Amino acid sequence: MSKQTDWVYTLTADDLAEIEAALRPLVDGDSDIASISKDDFPLPRLGPRLAELCNEVLNGRGFTLLRGLPVEQWSIRESATAYFGIGCHFGHARSQNGKGHVLGHVRDLGRDAVNDPTSRVYQTRERQTYHTDSCDIVALLCLKTAKSGGASALVSSMTIYNELRKRRPDLLRCLFEAMHSDRRGEVPDGENP
């Protein structure tokens, strides 16, 4: 994949103008980002292209890269609104944590994921290993390039399944067993930790 570029879509000037037109009334009206829907973020020309990319994510390659949002020129609010609005064209947001946040920031807050059972690894400088999130699509937006580290990597669960099926079919059943996850102290009412 690293030698190919067909999985990269670079936003055009027209795309950016359309995104800017969609985000401006939401930012100026101080809209609650979490309540934005696809209808609130109209992208008449870009929308069909995003639908194609979404289909590729869900039914094809499994990922895509959008490039070119001018986050260095926008405020965090503008960037978050554009990011969330574009995301609405891929599906519906899910909560990121026990507080119901639909947007989370990966930032070193000096927390210690090893010794603090309530810290999350994305709040530390520790390397995040491969993991799953409980949703169909995960999206990331880079607001600032890390001074070091910060590289993202993907792995295909279908490829893992197929390789296990080929090499160790006796282990396949493990993929379908219940899997425990640690909520890191963010337990919604009535749920197990």
Image (cartoon, helix red, strand yellow):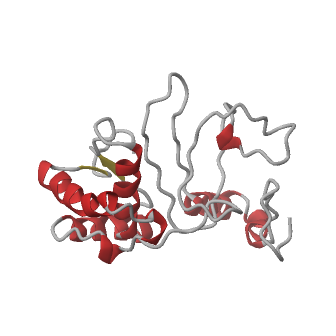
Residue at the outermost front position:
29
Residue at the outermost left position:
14
Residue beneath the point at 38% across and 60% down: 30
Residue 68 pos. (x, y %)? 27, 43
Residue 50 pos. (x, y %)? 28, 65
Residue 38 pos. (x, y %)? 34, 74
Residue beneath the point at 87% across and 37% down: 115
Q: Going by the image, does 173 lie left or right of 125?
A: right
Residue beneath the point at 39% across and 40% down: 2
Q: Going by the image, does 34 lie left or right of 41?
A: right
Quadrant, the C terminus: bottom right
* Picture quadrant where residue 82 is located: bottom left
Whether 184 is drawn above or below 177: the answer is: above
Whether 78 is drawn above or below 176: the answer is: above
* Picture quadrant where residue 191 is located: bottom right
Q: Nearer the viewer, residue 41 or 124?
A: 41
Q: Nearer the viewer, residue 11 or 6?
A: 11
Residue 167 pos. (x, y %)? 68, 57
Quadrant, the N terminus: top left
